[in-house]
Image: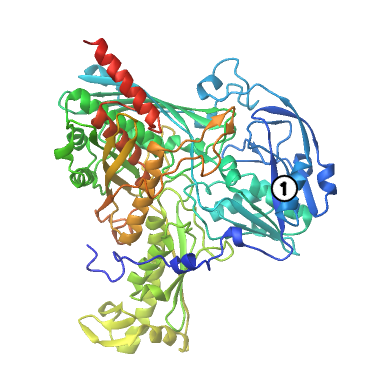
Amino acid sequence: MSEEFSFVGKRVPKLDAPGKVTGQLVYGHDMKVPRMLYGKILRSEHAHARILSVDTSRARALSGVKAVITAEDIPEVKIGWARDHPVLKSGKVRSTRDEIAAVAAVDEDTAREALELITVEYEELPAVFDPEEAMRPGAPVIHEEAPNNIQEKMRQSYYHGDVQESFADSDVVIEDRFKLPFVTHCCMGTCFCLASFSSSGELTVWSSTQMPFLYQRDLSMALGIPATKIRVIKAVIGGGFGSKLDMYPFEPICVFLAQKAGCPVKITFTREEEFMASPTRQPVICDIKSGAKKDGTLLAREVRMILDNGAYSSWGSTTPLVMMLTISSLYRVPNVKYDVTVAYTNNPYSGAMRGYGNPQATFVLESHMDMLAHELGMDPMEFRLKNANRPGDVTGQGVKISTCGLTECIESAAQSIGWKQKRAKPGNRGVGMASVFHVGGGARIYPSDGCGSTVKVDDFGKVTLITGSTDMGQGSDTVLAQIVAEELGVPVENITVVNTDTNITPWDVGAHASRTTFIAGNSARLAAADAKRQILEAAAQTLGDKVENLDMKDGKVFLKGEPEEWVPFAKMVRSKHFRPDGDVILTRGWYEPPTEKQDKEFRGNISATYSFATQAVEVEVDTETGEVTVLKIGAAHDVGRAINPMAVEGQIHGGVSMGLGYALYEEVLLEEGKMLNPNFADYALPTALEMPPIETILIETDDPAGPFGAKGMAEPANIPTAPAIANAVYDAVGVRIRDLPITPEKVLRALREKAEKAQEGK
């Protein structure tokens, strides 16, 4: 499909690759400005306790300390999605990551020493760490405003059809419970903030945020400073995956320290702090009931979820909206009921993480699809194909599916691992698969889901794209440059992308919901198309022909059908300057997707397009040790059109790695709310040694609404891996693991229980 293009569909290296491999790019951790101080934060020793006193006198007296603040020194500020999170805590603490005091000093050693000199007296309170226990009568109350420990804003109930009647009509009905753990992002670059006030009182914040403009707004609300006096500069981000989506207490704290000290202040998390104080993927307890006819027709799905919100509400508390989308709309299911409760506990609070709730929902749902197929006596692949979404479907939730390559994804992924030859064979090897349904064109959560772009062409033909979108390492700058290059017919190396400064760039809602390629790409293409129009109009006068008879390619403007009749692209730009009515090429593009916010019953088409994928895996299970080895993964993804196939493959490989970790290794271990494994030595991540061969299969469905047919696909890459592995383990040794990670201990326990049941049945 890419043969008709010059730059779209080509394997273009990331624009920032040379700077990264040579160390020339400046990450937030590397940043230094004159007179800069170093900030550190004192955190709670207890998961739930009353603060009786805080004595900072010795810290204030330490040489080199320039500022010390507690809740008494700053305005009362609450942040987070539900505005339930005090920046510095007074009265009581609700988790072990709670911020009590902060210092700014001339160096990090002095700042750390100052923290040790602060004395906090506590009265320990009863705590609760299980979300089900938290909602029971008599449980310790975490927030007085929520005496039942329920986050009422995200208590949701959705349905379409009639599940009870459909279960009565089903030939097979199964029910199960699944439990999914805390895991975290493990970005190579830890959280960072640098705040500085100018002599006129204007605030500049350098940040690793994924959402500069919403971050600017949140800072304004937290600090009481007009947004017009706040400038946000996005530093080079060493990984985001959703962890940089929200604003967290350390960032206003950094600003308050800078304000008090009268000097710039930088706060950078250590690796241990990153584990302990950055958000996690939220744990889920899920009860699911599914029903189908004996011919394999899926009839009904009922899901009840409990989410562990932790002590405060970050973006993790909003993930039920995305979970609902998968539960209501993955596969053709005419009857669905979904209830979710989000519970406060004294655990770490949950945030956004790649897939935004969909890895949890998909693990449950795709495990159950396999279990239904088993009960029906059907091949799990054929069961999925029978119920697969198709182009033109409108789901019960009002989701309008335009392009859809799910059938092709299922068939291609299965073929890549030899599904028909290997499934249900004797021995300890097995195959499994899982599919995914996810937004691919943004998500209408805010009043606007749009993005602005500006294209400037100088008199030498150099093109600058100024975009509101955020590149956090995923390579979106390169994709946008390819889109602009294709539209203007100039080489990618002649294009510079600027997206770092809220004082310069147009507005954008931020990097999330797999929206950047689709929405920012459409915006950039519109701006580039306007620049092309202006250049062709200038060329029409020079060549003495009509605009519609001209085109641009390879840095030339030429007559269609007569490529020898051409003028240089740069010359036509200069000609705009040198005329009596001259002008510069400076255009703008704004793209707002044609989507709708969900109504009060959670119905509505929230994305302009949807992404589909299927991953199929082959595993081997050691029945002596319980160890699971993944032998191969076939990953078939409907990408609309791959603007940069190399970047798409990189996203898939990275996503599979995250999914593999979720499936087999990763878990934040907590004891009384305290993290036991806050480092890479104890938090188990898959390394290159654990990564299996991955065959990536790009299904191009050419979405008519996307830029050159593209749609978002970054988040789906990590969503189906874990359920595919769990399903393969069942195919290999006949045991179903319902809680992640799938550790050797769990596998051995399940094998023992299976053997005991078999013995009892004799």
- Please name whichever residue, 547 or 1, is drawn nearer the observer in this view of the structure: 1
The residue at the point 37 percent across, 70 percent down is 529
Quarter of the view holding residue 124: top right
**Residue 383 x, y percent position in the rendering:** 19, 33
Above or below residue 173? Residue 55 is below
570 in relation to 50, above or below: below
Inspect this view and state whether residue 330 appears. Answer: no
Relative side of 159 to 79, left or right? left
Q: Position of residue 157 (x, y in %)?
A: 42, 27
Relative to 559, 214 lies left or right: right
Give the image's coloring scheme: rainbow
Amino acid carrying mark 1 in the image: Arg
Residue 36 vertical position relative to residue 692 in the rendered view, above or below: below
Which residue corresponds to the image point at 25% horizontal and 34% vertical from the top-left?
A: 332
Task: Quickly name the residue at label 1.
Answer: 112
- The residue shown at (40%, 74%) is 493
- Nearer-the-camera pick, 421 or 76: 421
Tell me where residue 116 sits by quadrant. Answer: top right
Q: How far across and down, in percent of the image, does residue 183 sit?
A: 48, 38
- Whether residue 324 is situated above or below residue 568 in the rendered picture: above
Disc 1 is placed on an element classified as helix
